[in-house]
Amino acid sequence: MNAVNYSISKSSFLKFEQCSKSFFLYKKHPYLRDKLSTDKQLTFRRGNDIGFFAQQLFPGGEDVSKTSKNVLEAYEQTKTLLEKKTPVIYEATFIFNGVLVMVDILHLDKEKYYAYEIKSSIKVSETYLRDACLQYYVLKNSLPGFEDLFLTTMNGDYVLSGNVEPKKMFKKRSVKKEAENNLPYFEEKIKNAYLIIEQNAIPNVPVGKHCFKPYQCDFFGSCWKDVMNDKSIFNLPLISKDKLFEWYDLGIKTIEQLYDDMFDNDIHARIRASFAENKPILNKEKIARLLGRIEAPYAALDMEIWSAAIPVLQGTKPFQQIPFLFCISESEKENHFLTEHKPDSRKQFAQELITQTSIYKTILVYDRTMEELALKGLKEVVPELGKELDDLKNKFVDLFDIFKNLDYYHPTFKSNFSLKSVTEIFNTGITYSGIQSGLEAMNIYEQWRSSEVPQDKVKIENDLVEYCLNDARATLKLADHLRNLIK
């Protein structure tokens, strides 16, 4: 290995594959990147945590990232460790043809090197495979004795029994065959990427489906600022991106340019009319039919779910969804149940849920998917309560159906039917000042479980309950708002 400079990281190369304009902006104008959302930050953090845990597959290695201050220092340190034939290196850093990669785990076995790329996922995506093949390309050309690279993901069939067993919890897949077939591809692509940098001009790439594949581009805000306005066709809900870009490529940019014959069904034409006239779609008959299913006494229910990548409770799998909090709101009172799951409290959770909902004939929810998955999981743990849990599910009246089926639609919704969006637009008086998403709630819940500071635990507990209660309150108020709409 010789000391060299680099211009392309693995991340920037993947951006180049998605869009040359995104790649150029990333290299030359990074300040234009969209602000990273809290949910994305938490997702990245989870990935880092899984990568660190995966080091137990080959314990006792040297971690380059902890003893180097920058990339080139990490590169030189890796070179030194390789000269010493260090058996296991974490975050080993390599540069070839100006491309930088950092290998999660590098293992020396019988004079052969094996690399492991760790992903906090159960499935192997095309993006993960391309990422690993790029690393293989760099390692093959810069590491004598390199034999193979394994894309390492979570084993979705692993069930925790006793202590976590890393070798069973992870599964690996060799990328050698795909990578060897794609070596010329990377040579050509890297050459083209350098041409983009050398031209020193922002590539003229129009917006398109590539802006969303494999992920929404980091420069979406910059590129789409003149596209996304109140009249943009991209505000239309329930229409595929293929169809929207078919129109866009024909020069149809605004909803006003559309006409009814262009839609596949009548509801899309009604949405267009709703935008054109700035009036809501209101199907009083169907709304009344759904609201007519609400029998008193009734209350609104919301649950929060914990989905640990590394299973904590005995008998659970990676990313298994486990309810940890439910909140009930009605006109006269509010209740909740929060458990630390120390030890596993799913049986108690099910019992409390059944007891606290038994007095109601109807349970209002907003998008029943999460609640039904939670009940299904609880039935597997406490099958003796299966009938009671089924009875609870049969009490559900899902207000989301009204919006999903477009029995009520207002142009201000655009394509966002989330409870928070609908609540804000309907001005129900519910405000979310702390936790903003289920993923954030799950992350804070893990902090609550691990905290040993009483004051911190009390504050976190209050924040979690308030967030969950707000969703239940919003659902309850939404029912009242819908009643007023059809009067």
Image: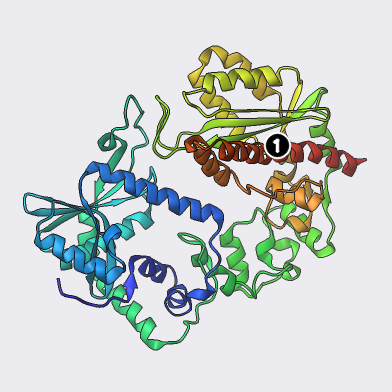
Q: Secondary structure at mark 1?
A: helix
Horizontal side of residue 75 vs 386, given as left or right? left
Using the image as rendered, state which of residue 1 and residue 135 is in the foreground.
1
Residue 323 lies left or right of residue 329; in this view the side is: left
| Structural crowding at the residue carrying mark 1, measured as other residues with C-alpha within 10 Å and reported as few (<14), some (14–19) or many (≥20) | many
| Above-or-below relation of 113 to 17 | above
Q: Quadrant of residue 262?
A: bottom right
**Closest to the observer, 138 or 341:** 341
Give the quarter of the image for residue 477.
top right
Mark 1 lies on residue: 469
Q: Where residue 316 appears, x then y in whole percent?
A: 42, 28
> Is the C terminus in the top left, top right, bottom left or bottom right quadrant?
top right
180 lies left or right of 221: left
In the rendered image, the vertical position of residue 240 relative to residue 185, given as above or below: above
Q: Residue at x 76, y 69 (%)?
A: 256
Q: How is the image coloured?
A: rainbow
Residue 106: % across, % down? 20, 54
Label 1 sits on what residue type? Leu
Residue at the location (69% across, 59% down)? 236
